[in-house]
Image (tube, rainbow, N blue to C red):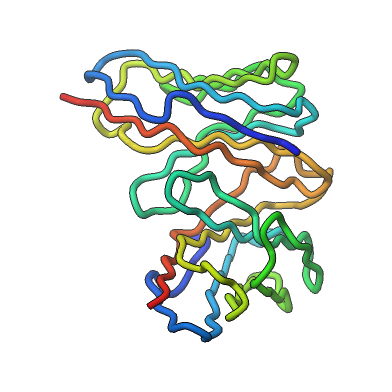
Amino acid sequence: DGGITQSPKYLFRKEGQNVTLSCEQNLNHDAMYWYRQDPGQGLRLIYYSQIVNDFQKGDIAEGYSVSREKKESFPLTVTSAQKNPTAFYLCASSTRGGTQAPTDTQYFGPGTRLTVL
Amino acid sequence: KQEVTQIPAALSVPEGENLVLNCSFTDSAIYNLQWFRQDPGKGLTSLLLIQSSQREQTSGRLNASLDKSSGRSTLYIAASQPGDSATYLCAAGTGTASKLTFGTGTRLQVTL
């Protein structure tokens, strides 16, 4: 079954802790994305990667970090510098990134709900 | 900066009705316009993608239209069913990296 998996489904973080959210895809997609969703707000882009070993900041990258060492994996670390990390985090992928991709839809994982204790 | 607005924020209709969801965007220089469905506590499911050169796309009971010059898209749902109850999100694809800017969604409830 092809798709995007995210783990864990629920995550609890103590003040001052770094936590890492996992995102894996077996769709052979080049581009991957991380979004944050807060109640009453649209999804906001945190980081995106168009190809392995390359990634760019999105609109709200402060307090987050990513890596893209493998095509199928794009983990997101929420650092202690992120002041309000409680949110629903969604990972997505698409066949291609960049200007070649106007026909490419984004496929989303099931999400991770992060709560700060 | 692209801004996407969806009206209404919530909508309740009886089963069988046809309905229209609205999406507006401020920057007409888009690559595409995508509609997604989100069930409570779940990820997004892609419904339709309209390229900037297209006027509409259809899938089953769903029809999405795009008018770039006026900055509007609509999602038409025919013969609504209780299983259509969900939040519907539109997103405008802009920039050089196929970045999506999302609206806040319309929460649809279809009642028996």
Q: Which quadrant is the C terminus of chain B positioned in?
A: top left
Image mark count: 0
Picture quadrant of residue A72: bottom right
Q: Foreground residue, A13 or A68?
A: A13
Which residue is at 52% across, 41% downward? B46
- The image shows residue A77 at horizontal and vertical percentages of 60, 77
Q: Foreground residue, A53 or A83?
A: A83
- The image shows residue B105 at horizontal and vertical percentages of 47, 36
Picture quadrant of residue B3: top right
One can see residue B98 in this view: yes
Picture layout, residue B18 above or below residue A65:
above
Q: Which quadrant is the N terminus of chain B positioned in?
A: top right
Q: Is residue B66 left or right of residue A56?
A: left
- The image shows residue A50 at horizontal and vertical percentages of 77, 59
- The image shows residue B103 at horizontal and vertical percentages of 56, 37
Q: Foreground residue, A109 or B58?
A: A109
Which residue is at 71% across, 28% downward? B51
Of all residues shown, which one is farthest toward the left? B112
Picture layout, residue B109 above or below residue A74:
above
One can see residue A3 in this view: no
Q: Is residue B24 left or right of residue A40?
A: right
Q: Foreground residue, A14 or A10?
A: A14
